[in-house]
Image: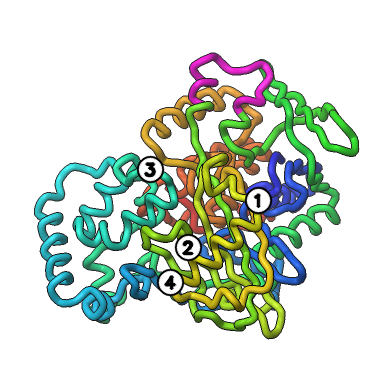
């Protein structure tokens, strides 16, 4: 297995459940990928805020069996900061009317109705997708600023697939009727509570890694994949390198990879044709900076997180980890995470750590989220290639890579980065289950179908990785 994030460690779990041998190689010194927990002086920081919520029973059972009583149920509270005011998120009709005013709310409603009348062709971009469901005025108010902070490009250059996966069946009408209690339709984006490990998401993946080690499937951290050697029969060996052992050639019967899709392709030996290499180099990623702040105020605000739709603030979102779990902080303190979405080498990414800490203190202080004088310590955490980008042309590039990789029979790509798809943890885990079963059983599960569209869950009879037959929610 290449990569020890949720996908790679799930693949290892399936492997050991079947009594098969294997090894996991992870370039980072810590398991969990973007879902790891960073510890600083006893305070814990989650890189982006990872809710544990799934419709896949097998995934839910694995989470619960892994952590038991350490797997907490937590209430969700989140808001949007916009025009100097805080709006409940998901949006509530009475809150929007009160804070935007009757006139502006009426304009938003007219904009929504106008969008409904114009809605005909399938949307091609994120902006098209959202405006067709909410109207231009609500898009400008509650989507444009935050989305452009996240991706660094206009919503008109982001493909509609991202909205279809992340927002799903939420619309102005479903949000309005839910807020007014006219009907209670389940909407994926409106989850009101979720599970969370007491010590942060990394606790889940550290425990799975320990159990993998105990079962004879070692997890080698600090080990980078340099080459993936392949031929007519598929992958035959991989070359890895770590500071202790140097370079090593490892013979393999098969590979499950969750490392970035572009990185995998460029590691292939021999390299693919020029068109495939060009497609790999076309894929882009958005990087993440989490500025952790330790405050003597035990509850600066009650939310799990707040979206910052404020053009005067570089931060896009702020997490209150004490609200995620009391185990994330020490008594009498709390820890916050201000999130900055960047490209490596840009102005924000290049700031020194102390400059980032001062920036976060100043920005959160000026909008009233905290008293800067309450901050007693901080840490800057850089997360390269955190989010695969859905920019123009990405889908053609992925299709080219997918077609080529299908010619290597014993290589399975899984997970968020392995598929270049903005999956949640459970999606990434389920792709790992299917990909590993493809190698072990000679099955033909389509890992690329997981989370492929808004209506993606069906029930199928499938033998789960432990061998028992069960009804498992999977994908068409």
The reply to whether the C-beta atoms of the residues labelled 1 and 4 are less than 8 Å apart is no
Q: CA distance from mark 1 to mark 3?
A: 25 Å
Q: CA distance from mark 4 to mark 2?
A: 13 Å
Q: Position of residue 91 (x, y in %)?
A: 31, 71
Of labels 2 and 1, earlier in sequence is: 1
Q: Of discs 4 and 3, which sits in the foreground?
A: 4
Q: Which residue is mark 4?
A: 367
Most common SS among magenta residues: helix
Q: CA distance from mark 2 to mark 3?
A: 17 Å
What numbered label is drawn on residue 153?
3
Of labels 4 and 3, earlier in sequence is: 3
Report helix, strand or loop for mark 3. Answer: loop
Magenta span: 265-280
What numbered label is drawn on residue 33?
1
Residue 212 in sight in this render: yes
Q: Of discs 1 and 3, which sits in the foreground?
A: 3
> Is residue 401 covered in magenta?
no
């Amino acid at each position: 297995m290449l990569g020890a994030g949720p996908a790679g460690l799930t693949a290892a779990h399936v492997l050991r459940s079947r009594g098969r041998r294997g090894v996991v190689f992870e370039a980072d010194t810590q398991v969990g990928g973007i879902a790891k927990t960073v510890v600083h002086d006893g305070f814990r920081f989650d890189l982006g805020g990872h809710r544990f919520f799934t419709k896949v029973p097998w995934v839910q059972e694995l989470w619960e069996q892994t952590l038991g009583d350490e797997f907490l149920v937590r209430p969700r509270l989140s808001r949007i900061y916009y025009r100097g005011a805080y709006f409940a998120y998901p949006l509530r009709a009475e809150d929007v009317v009160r804070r935007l005013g009757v006139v502006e709310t009426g304009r938003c409603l007219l904009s929504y109705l106008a969008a409904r009348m114009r809605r005909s062709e399938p949307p091609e971009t994120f902006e098209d997708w959202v405006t067709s469901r909410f109207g231009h005025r609500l898009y400008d108010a509650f989507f444009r600023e935050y989305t452009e902070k996240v991706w660094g490009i206009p919503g008109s250059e982001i493909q509609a697939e991202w909205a279809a996966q992340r927002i799903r069946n939420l619309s102005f009408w479903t949000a309005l009727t839910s807020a007014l209690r006219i009907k209670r339709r389940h909407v994926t984006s409106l989850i009101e509570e979720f599970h969370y490990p007491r010590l942060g998401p990394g606790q889940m993946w550290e425990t799975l890694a320990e159990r993998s080690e105990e079962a004879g499937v070692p997890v080698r951290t600090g080990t980078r994949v340099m080459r993936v050697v392949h031929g007519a029969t598929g992958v035959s060996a991989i070359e890895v390198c770590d500071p202790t052992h140097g370079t090593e050639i490892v013979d393999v019967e098969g590979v499950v990879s969750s490392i970035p899709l572009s990185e995998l392709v460029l590691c292939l030996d021999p390299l693919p044709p020029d068109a495939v290499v060009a497609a790999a180099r076309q894929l882009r990623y958005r990087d993440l900076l989490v500025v952790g702040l330790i405050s003597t105020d035990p509850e600066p605000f009650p939310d799990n997180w707040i979206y910052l739709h404020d053009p005067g603030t570089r931060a896009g979102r702020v997490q209150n980890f004490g609200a995620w779990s009391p185990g994330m902080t020490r008594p009498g303190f709390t820890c916050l995470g201000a999130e900055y979405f960047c490209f490596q080498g840009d102005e924000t990414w290049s700031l020194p750590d102390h400059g980032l800490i001062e920036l976060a203190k100043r920005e959160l202080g000026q909008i009233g989220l905290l008293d800067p004088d309450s901050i007693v310590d901080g840490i800057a955490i850089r997360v390269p290639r955190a989010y695969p980008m859905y920019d123009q042309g990405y889908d053609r590039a992925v299709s080219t890579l997918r077609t080529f990789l299908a010619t290597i029979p014993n290589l399975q790509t899984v997970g968020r980065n392995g598929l270049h798809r903005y999956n949640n943890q459970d999606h990434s885990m389920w792709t790992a289950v299917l990909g590993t079963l493809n190698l072990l059983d000679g099955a033909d599960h389509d890992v690329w179908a997981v989370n492929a569209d808004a209506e993606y869950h069906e029930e199928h009879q499938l033998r789960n990785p432990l061998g028992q037959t069960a009804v498992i929610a999977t994908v068409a």
